[in-house]
Image (spheres, grey):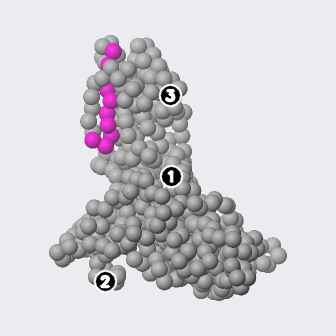
């Protein structure tokens, strides 16, 4: 993509409305623009990141055996009356009346809709287990939407729902998601800590929140020090028994599950082995048994011909929140530092002297070669000051900067800068290309 045509409205100044660093940087880097309180437009740079996060989330859901579906955003209130949540959900639910005066709503979550799909189409235990997920927009009329995409009113969620014949099966589904979450967050370059949690309005008695550490987080983490050092297995056999792995991760909590008020410091040691920190909830998983299946009559025929009310769980990831969360976890004073797995482009190619024939020729050649090799590259071909180009490239945080100037070109060299380490080195054009995978 050529910077001269790319729709990338970066800002030099810090926008006054942004209180936390990720919100500031997303606005400054031209990723998002606010439409209304808690409702955002995603511009091309932001959308590229959102799609990459989405893709990793999807790959890990598929690997864990879940199947993707797409449910409507606008739902009928009737299903929610059946589950009993229509009145309970309160003001967070955006209620809509259609032209026939029917009560509708914009989905804040999809337990009811998916249970309805299930009961209409699955009748026998032979079709179990099933895990159905979607990646779709939700609306929750939050009292205090804030921090940009972190606490939006409209936000993108991955929501998965599991259906099993009995508790043992439901537990296996829960464990699969637990492990899929560890893998997903690791691929996104995040250290996520599973914490026992309240089930809240979703209901149920087994639940974990996944929290990434950040000074600006709204959740408290209170756990054994060892949990911060655990590493996620790079290879998982989902057909094997995952209970041991989950037990290992869940054995390292503090003695109490009570919500702990973290101090201001990022991670504080509060007792010999216990640490307290502040973090952002990026995922939340629930086992709630027959709460919805019973109320909505989601029943299958069991092995002996008897009717069995299915056991369910639901599993959410805040996909749009993750984009902000990754920035909270990875930035410096100059801007964003994208992990390669979600970077909007891998390389920022900077032409330091537009109009100089040899520099132009070299830059164009590099641009074409990288693109042909399938390397995602943003080519800054604008006639701007070098300082402005560097600042802009640092702000948007692409992992590599390839800098082409007249002096280097005369000697057959270019400069390669690593955004994360800040390290710059002069290397030959061929070496630069091979380092970038072209
Ligand atoms: C699980 C999937 C549920 O809704 N039902 C379907 C369950 N869980 S949850 O914890 O309420 O939400 C799941 C994740 O969505 C993100 N999230 C938000 N992101 C941005 N803005 C919001 N207002 C918001 N609310 C929830 C969180 O990451 C949460 O873990």
Judged from the image, the secondary structure of the residue bearing numbered disc 2 is: loop
**Residue 16: quadrant of the picture:** bottom left
Q: Is residue 420 magenta?
A: yes
Q: Look at the image and give the residue range highlighted in magenta.
A: 412-421
**Residue 254: quadrant of the picture:** bottom left
> Is residue 407 among the parts visible in the rendering?
yes
Q: Is residue 417 magenta?
A: yes
Taking 279 as reference, is 58 above or below it? Answer: above
Question: For this rendering, which residue is in front, 223 or 267?
Answer: 223
User: What residue is rendered at 35% in x and 23% in y?
Assistant: 431
From the image, tell me which residue sits under label 3. 373
**Residue 422: quadrant of the picture:** top left
Q: Earlier in the sequence, mark 2 or mark 3?
A: 2
Task: Give the CA distance from mark 3 to mark 1.
Answer: 22 Å
Q: Earlier in the sequence, mark 3 or mark 1?
A: 1
Outermost residue on the right side: it is 100
> Is residue 352 among the parts visible in the rendering?
no
Give the mark count. 3
Where residue 394 sits: x, y (%)? 35, 41
User: What residue is rendered at 43% in x and 13% in y?
Assistant: 357
Question: For this rendering, which residue is in front, 46 or 229?
Answer: 229
Taking 54 as reference, is 151 above or below it? Answer: below
From the image, tell me which residue sits under label 1. 56
Task: Give the CA distance from mark 2 to mark 3.
Answer: 53 Å
Judged from the image, the secondary structure of the residue bearing numbered disc 3 is: loop
Where residue 60 sits: x, y (%)? 51, 56
Is residue 329 shown left or right of residue 92?
left
């Amino acid at each position: 993509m050529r910077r001269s045509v790319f729709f990338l409205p970066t800002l030099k100044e810090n926008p006054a409305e942004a209180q936390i660093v990720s919100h500031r940087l997303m606005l400054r880097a031209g990723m998002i623009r606010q439409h209304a309180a808690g409702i955002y437009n995603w511009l091309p740079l932001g959308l590229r990141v959102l799609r990459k996060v989405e893709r990793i989330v999807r790959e890990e859901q598929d690997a864990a055996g879940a199947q993707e579906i797409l449910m409507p955003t606008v739902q009928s209130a009737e299903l929610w009356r059946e589950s009993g949540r229509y009145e309970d959900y309160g003001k967070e639910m955006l209620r809509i009346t259609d032209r026939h005066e029917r009560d509708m709503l914009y989905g804040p979550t999809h337990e009811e809709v998916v249970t309805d799909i299930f009961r209409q189409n699955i009748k026998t235990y032979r079709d179990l287990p099933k895990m159905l997920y979607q990646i779709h927009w939700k609306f929750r009329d939050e009292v205090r939407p804030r921090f940009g995409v972190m606490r939006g009113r409209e936000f993108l969620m991955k929501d998965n729902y599991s259906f099993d014949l009995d508790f043992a099966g439901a537990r296996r589904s829960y464990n699969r998601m637990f492990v899929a979450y560890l893998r997903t967050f690791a691929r996104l370059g995040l250290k996520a800590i599973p914490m026992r949690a309240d089930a809240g309005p979703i209901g149920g008695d087994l639940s974990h929140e996944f929290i990434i550490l950040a000074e600006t987080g709204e959740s408290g983490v209170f756990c054994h020090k060892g949990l911060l050092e655990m590493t996620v297995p790079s290879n998982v056999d989902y057909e094997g028994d995952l209970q041991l792995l989950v037990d290992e991760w869940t054995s390292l909590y503090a003695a109490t599950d009570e919500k702990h008020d973290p101090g201001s410091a990022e991670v504080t040691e509060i007792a010999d082995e216990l640490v307290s920190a502040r973090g952002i909830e990026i995922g939340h998983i629930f086992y709630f048994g027959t709460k919805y299946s019973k109320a909505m009559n989601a029943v299958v025929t069991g092995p002996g011909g008897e009717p069995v009310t299915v056991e369910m769980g639901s599993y959410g990831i805040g996909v749009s929140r993750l984009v902000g969360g990754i920035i909270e976890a990875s930035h410096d004073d100059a801007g964003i530092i994208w992990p390669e797995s979600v970077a909007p482009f891998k390389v920022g190619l900077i032409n330091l002297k537009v109009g100089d024939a040899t520099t132009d020729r070299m830059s164009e050649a590099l641009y074409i070669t990288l693109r042909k090799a399938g390397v995602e590259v943003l080519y800054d071909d604008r006639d701007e000051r070098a300082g402005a180009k560097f600042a802009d490239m640092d702000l948007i945080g692409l992992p590599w900067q390839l800098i082409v100037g007249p002096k280097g070109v005369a000697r057959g060299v270019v400069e390669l800068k690593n955004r994360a380490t800040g390290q710059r080195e002069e290397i030959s054009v061929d070496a630069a290309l091979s380092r970038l995978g072209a």
